[in-house]
Image (tube, rainbow, N blue to C red):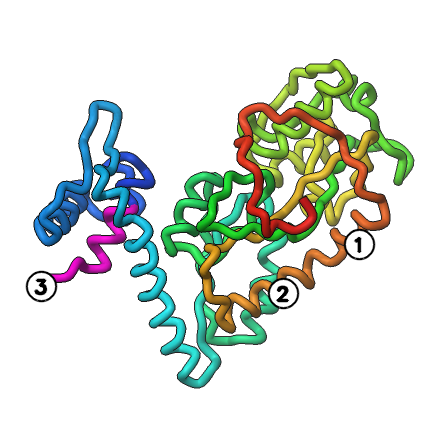
Amino acid sequence: MKLPTLAQLRTLLAVVETGNLSLAAKRLHLTQSAVSQQVGELERTLEQRLLERLPGGVVPTATGEGILEAARRALAAAEDVLTLAAEHGEGHRGRVRIGTGGTTSAFLLPDVLARAKLAMPGLEIRVTIGNTVDLLGRIESGELDVGLLTLPVPTNRHLEVELLAREPLLAFLPPPGEPEGDAVGPERLAALPLILYESGGHTRRVSDGWFAEAGLAPVPIMEIGSVETIRRMVRNGLGATILPALALSEEKGRPLDPPLWRELAVVTRADKRRDRALRLFLEELHHATEPLRAAASAQGTREAKLEISGEPDTPCDARTAGR
């Protein structure tokens, strides 16, 4: 009996997760005709229709839905074969594939990855920057080993979420600013020209909610998708902003009153085997975020209670720590 190939299963999962043949082709770096061909070959092998093409996109049939979990397990098992083979070699090689957001990748990962690479010179590192929903799908399918994401995230029984650190959001004021350490309230900040992260990002949603709690809805003079550009604008006196503490490690950020936080979490597949490379990465990650945990402990756990519109209302996995 002819068996499905891993490439066919990977293609099926990509089509189901994106709901679109062209998006699946883009994710897999294939042509759309190649995606259609692989799905067709899989359907002929199984002698079952797996996808239904509707005007709004592509959805799995009952059979297609029924084989998704087995397909994920097959891909995960193949990845484990590669990992185990590497571990049974000299023990100096490994691979970790990470999905995260732009701020974390710029201000947290460089030091973490440099230390991990020093401990394992043969470590292969792949970093994917993207939106939470896409990254979660790629973690679940086995394309990524781990996600470093901001809570809340939608979860299911295939994913495990572990709270890593609670990171304060800080005000960053144009020079000459205010005496170092003085807390900044929403009224004070709203009175300044604001340069905020672009709409849709988690930091922006939380910041907007913080102002809304005080009955304010300030309109920023600039909305920018680059944290480094925002910092440069503020340093040049063009306005004030709110940024995660990691992005202000070299600046004089001011605490917010009431305090505001974002929570960083490690997300893996629930059945993910933590090989040496992944364990090493997580150890370095926990070491690098220790100052954030210490700061959160020193300042207490009180945080602004915000209603964040547009965020999933799905509760975190029961294994989530500190929620």
Give the CA distance from mark 2 to mark 1. Answer: 16 Å
Q: Amino acid at mark 2?
A: Glu
Question: Where in the figure is residue 230, as x and y percent of width and height?
Answer: 64, 34
Dot 1 or dot 3, earlier in sequence? 3
Residue 310 versus residue 144 in the image, above or below: above
Residue 135 versus residue 199 in the image, above or below: below
Q: Residue at x 27, y 46 (%)?
A: 66
Q: Which residue is mark 1?
A: 294
Give the CA distance from mark 3 to mark 2. Answer: 46 Å
Question: Where in the figure is residue 29, as x and y percent of width and height?
Answer: 26, 49
Relative to 307, is 50 on the left or the right?
Answer: left
Q: Amino acid at mark 1?
A: Ala
The residue tagged with tag 3: helix, strand or loop? loop
Q: Which residues are magenta?
A: 2-13
Q: Nearer the viewer, residue 286 or 92?
A: 286
**Mainly helix, strand or loop, the magenta region?**
helix
Q: Are marks 1 and 3 in contact (CB under 8 Å)?
A: no
The residue tagged with tag 2: helix, strand or loop? helix
Tell me, yes or no, if residue 238 can be seen here: no
Q: Amino acid at mark 3?
A: Met
Q: Residue at x 74, y 20 (%)?
A: 213
Tell me, yes or no, if residue 236 can be seen here: yes
Q: Nearer the viewer, residue 290 or 304?
A: 304
Q: Nearer the viewer, residue 107 or 65?
A: 65
| Tag in front: 1 or 3 | 3
Q: Which residue is mark 3?
A: 1
The residue tagged with tag 1: helix, strand or loop? helix
Question: Where in the figure is residue 126, as x and y percent of width and height?
Answer: 44, 59
Relative to 130, is 294 on the left or the right?
Answer: right
Quadrant where the C terminus sits is top right
Q: Which residue is mark 2?
A: 284
